[in-house]
Image: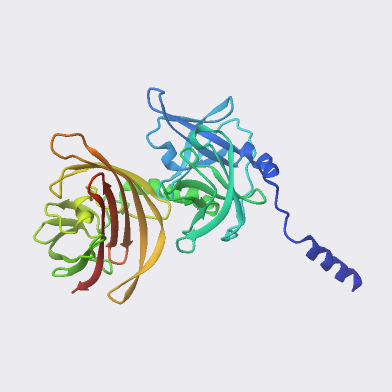
């Protein structure tokens, strides 16, 4: 009895593993965080990022680091190894690579579900090419639904940090640092390390889908039969709100025709796929939502938290020709109420530049920001917020919000 009590007391006294001092943590894991350098077909440098060793001869980085690369290497100081892609999961922006004759030790992974808001975390990566840079902060948020959560942190990251490690105070890998919100203060994000276990299976599925088409037979899977698909005569009623004056303008999109997977609104002025992807638009009605829209719309198929893409295009839909260069990221999920119905929505952040062409003068480079809230159950964006600032005319800010659906 006494021995049992003493044993229990000893276990309680031991408690959880002690947190490491920052220098000890860095010494423990920095040898497992490598720089990534990519090259085009002529061996010219393309981009730089980071990667973390997760198994013998295996590292993981962000897929956007490897985009457009013909070859790439991982390196530390003056040591470099050629690497090859093994498992790509572009939807989650995770790519596993393999390296022959590579002896750097793998990191330990934090237990699944152990991330908690407020805990001390450390980011190690290669921001702006500065190899093995350590920064610290807290885990400031968990964004998204259970199983698809992004890790939000105040630990500093910058271009080049993508693919680096976010570690807990014991030196265990919590996540892969992926992106930072520009001009967003300490809004930095990582994808959770627990996703790594799913990488091989998800990569296999993605490659099979690419080889066989969306439905495995070379055809895109039709969406018209799903719940919430647009129906003939249906009207989506929005309100366009001027953020400076408060003026509210009704905007309606009426389904006039459905042909295959194409849905025609307002006598063909707007044509969408049944999942909301834009096909064409000849007469914008929804303010910046229409006038600044990328050619294929504000969303992508099968979006997941952490998914990223870039859009560069020219639009003259509003009568004013403008060129856009926007970075997009799915930053999480939330809920919005539309006409009394609670909807799960995916939140997509856009940030970049609008180059307005006025007359024969030079284009004005205007910072542009937008946030789209996409409801999969409706197959469309139900709220869109956008703003940009003109040099002499001040801020333009708009919100387009779905208020009801007439059936």
**Residue sitting at 53 percent across and 57 percent down?**
140
Q: Is residue 211 visible?
A: no
Q: Quadrant of the C terminus?
A: bottom left
Left or right of residue 159, residue 321 in this image: left
Report whether 183 appears left or right of 76: left
When asked about the image quadrant of residue 123, the answer is: top right
> Where 38 sits versus 351, above or below?
above
Viewer-proximal residue, 221 or 235?
235
User: Where 374 falls versus 74 (above or below)?
Assistant: below
Q: Residue furthest front?
A: 392
Residue in view at x 38 percent, y 68 percent: 335
Tell me residue 20's x, y (percent). Answer: 70, 49
Figure disc tally: 0
The image shows residue 11, relative to residue 363, as above or below, that is below
Instruction: Work out which residue is located at the far top of the displayed protein and give it.
Output: 42
> Quadrant where the N terminus lies?
bottom right
Give coordinates of residue 83: x percent, y percent: 51, 32
Residue sitting at the far left: 267
> x and y percent of residue 280 in the render?
16, 51
Compared across the picture, whether 328 is left or right of 12 comes to: left
Coordinates of residue 168 in the picture (x, y in percent): 62, 52
């Amino acid at each position: 009895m006494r021995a049992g009590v003493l044993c229990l007391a000893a276990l309680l006294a031991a408690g959880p593993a002690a947190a490491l001092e920052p220098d000890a943590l860095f010494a423990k894991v920095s040898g497992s965080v490598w720089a990534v350098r990519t090259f085009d077909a002529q061996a010219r440098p393309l981009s730089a990022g980071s990667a973390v060793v997760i198994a013998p001869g295996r590292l993981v980085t962000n897929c956007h680091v490897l985009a457009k690369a013909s070859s790439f290497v991982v390196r530390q100081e003056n040591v470099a190894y050629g690497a090859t892609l093994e498992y790509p999961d572009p939807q989650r922006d995770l790519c596993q690579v393999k390296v022959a004759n590579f002896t750097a030790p793998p990191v330990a992974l934090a237990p699944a579900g152990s991330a908690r808001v407020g805990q001390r975390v450390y980011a190690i990566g290669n921001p702006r090419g500065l190899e093995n840079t350590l920064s610290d902060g807290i885990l400031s948020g968990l964004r998204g639904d259970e199983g698809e959560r992004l890790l939000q942190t105040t630990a500093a990251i910058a271009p080049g940090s993508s693919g680096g490690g976010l570690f807990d105070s014991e030196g265990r890998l919590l996540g892969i640092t992926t992106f930072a919100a520009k001009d967003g203060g300490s809004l930095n994000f990582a994808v959770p390390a627990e996703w790594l276990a799913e990488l091989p299976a998800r990569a296999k599925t993605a490659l099979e889908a690419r080889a066989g088409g969306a439905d495995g037979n070379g055809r895109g899977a039709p969406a018209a039969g799903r719940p919430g698909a647009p129906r003939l005569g249906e009207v989506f009623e929005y309100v366009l709100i001027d953020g400076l004056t408060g003026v509210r303008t009704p905007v309606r999109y009426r389904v006039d025709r459905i042909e295959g997977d194409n849905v025609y609104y307002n006598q063909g002025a707007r044509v969408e796929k049944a999942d909301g992807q834009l096909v064409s638009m000849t007469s914008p009605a929804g303010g910046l939502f229409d006038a600044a829209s990328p050619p294929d719309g504000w969303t992508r198929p099968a979006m997941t938290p952490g998914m990223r893409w870039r859009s560069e295009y020219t639009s003259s839909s509003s009568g004013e020709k403008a060129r856009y260069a926007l970075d997009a990221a799915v930053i999480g999920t939330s809920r919005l109420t539309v006409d009394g119905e609670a909807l799960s929505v995916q939140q997509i952040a856009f940030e970049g530049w609008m180059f307005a062409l006025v007359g024969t003068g030079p284009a004005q480079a205007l910072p542009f920001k937008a946030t789209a809230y996409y409801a999969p159950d409706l197959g469309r964006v139900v709220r869109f917020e956008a703003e940009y600032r003109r040099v002499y005319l001040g801020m333009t800010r708009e919100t387009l919000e779905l208020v009801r659906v007439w059936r």
